[in-house]
Image: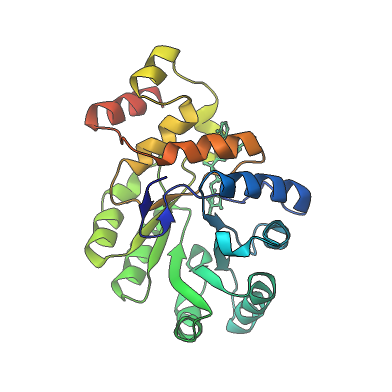
Amino acid sequence: MEERRLGPVVGLGTWKTFDRDAKLARTVVGSALESGCRVIDSSPMYGAAEASLAAALEGRRESAMVATKIWARTVAEGREQFRRQLNWFEKVEIEQIHNLLAWEDHAAWLEEERAAGRIDRLGVTHYSDEALDELAAALKTRRFDTVQVPLNPRERECERELLPLAAELGVAVIVMRPLGQGALLRRSPPPEVIAALGVETWAQALLKWALSDGRVDLVIPATRNFERARENAAAGSPPWFDEEQRSLVERWA
Ligand SMILES: NC(=O)c1ccc[n+]([C@@H]2O[C@H](COP(=O)([O-])OP(=O)(O)OC[C@H]3O[C@@H](n4cnc5c(N)ncnc54)[C@H](OP(=O)(O)O)[C@@H]3O)[C@@H](O)[C@H]2O)c1
C-alpha cells in the first residue's frame, strides 16, 4: 500500500461498527492490519469503540497507529478521556479535538502531552461544512498537525479552501465518510465502468477517487465486515485516477 505522511493511505474508522463487540473488532481490525492498514480512528463519542479497539489490539499494538479524539466541554473531562486512552493504548499517535469542541481550551494541555511524547500528532475534526471556516481558523494558528473532514464525490466543500490551506501549511488530511456513510454504495455502476477504472469494486473506486487527490493523506472507511476491510485496503495502491477517471466516478456517484 502507498504511504503518505500518516503511513499507509487506507485506515479504518470505528463509528457505529464495533461499540461493545470486542470480538468483532478483533476480527475486522486484524483483517485491516493484515491487509496493510495502520491507522484506526475512534472517539469517546463512539460508545465503547475505544475499549473494543484496545481489546482488538492486544498483542499487536505496535502494528497500529491509534487516531482517537477528545470530545469534552471541559478540560477536566478531556483529561479524564485522555487518561483512559493512555490506559488502553499507552500512547496516542494522532489525538484530535472532536468537532472542535472547546478546541482552544484543549489545545494548550494537549500540546504539553505532545511535547511529553504521549501524543505524536495533534489534530482537529468536524463533520459539517458549516464548521469549515472555524477549522481553517484553527489550522492558521499552526498548532495542529492533522485535520479530518468529509470528502467524497457528493461532499466536496473542503476542496474550495480547506484542502489548499492544509497543503500550504503542511497539515496532513484525514478523510472521514469516504463512502458517504454507505449511501454511495446503494447502487453500483455496471461492470464495464468498474473495469475502466481498473478496480474490482465500486467501494474501491470511491476510495481511490479521494486518494487520487494528492492533498489527501488517509481515508478511514468503516466496516463491520472483515472481507470488506481487506477489499478497502486494496484501494490504497497506485495507479491513481486521472481527471477523466475521477469525472467518471463523479458521474456515477
Ligand atoms: N460520519 C461522521 O460524521 C464522522 C464524523 C467523524 C469521524 N468519522 C470517522 O470517519 C469514519 C468513516 O466514516 P463513516 O463510518 O461515517 O462512513 P463511511 O466509512 O463512508 O461508510 C461506512 C459504511 O460503508 C459500508 N462499507 C464499508 N466498506 C464497504 C464495502 N467495501 N462495500 C460495501 N459497503 C461498505 C459499511 O457497512 P458495513 O459495516 O456493512 O460494511 C458502513 O455502513 C468513521 O467510522 C469515523 O471513524 C465519521
State the quadrant of the C terminus.
top left
Image quarter of residue 131:
bottom left
Please provide percent x and percent y for residue 80.
67, 80
State the quadrant of the N terminus.
top left
Quadrant of the image where one finds ligand 1: top right
Residue 25 horizontal side relative to residue 193, left or right: right
Q: Residue at x 34, y 29 (%)?
A: 250
Q: Which residue is drawn at 22% across and 63% down?
A: 168
| Residue in front for this viewpoint, 136 or 44 | 44
Please provide percent x and percent y for residue 244.
24, 26
Image quarter of residue 58:
bottom right
Please provide percent x and percent y for residue 7.
42, 57
Q: Is residue 151 above or below residue 66?
A: above
Please provide percent x and percent y for residue 210.
37, 41
> Is residue 64 visible to us here?
no
| Residue in front for this viewpoint, 206 or 72 | 206
> Is residue 131 visible to us here?
yes
Q: Residue at x 70, y 56 (%)?
A: 56
Q: Give the number of callouts.
A: 0
Q: In this view, does 7 lie above or below 235?
A: below
Q: Is residue 107 above or below residue 58?
A: below
Residue 86 horizontal side relative to residue 130, left or right: right
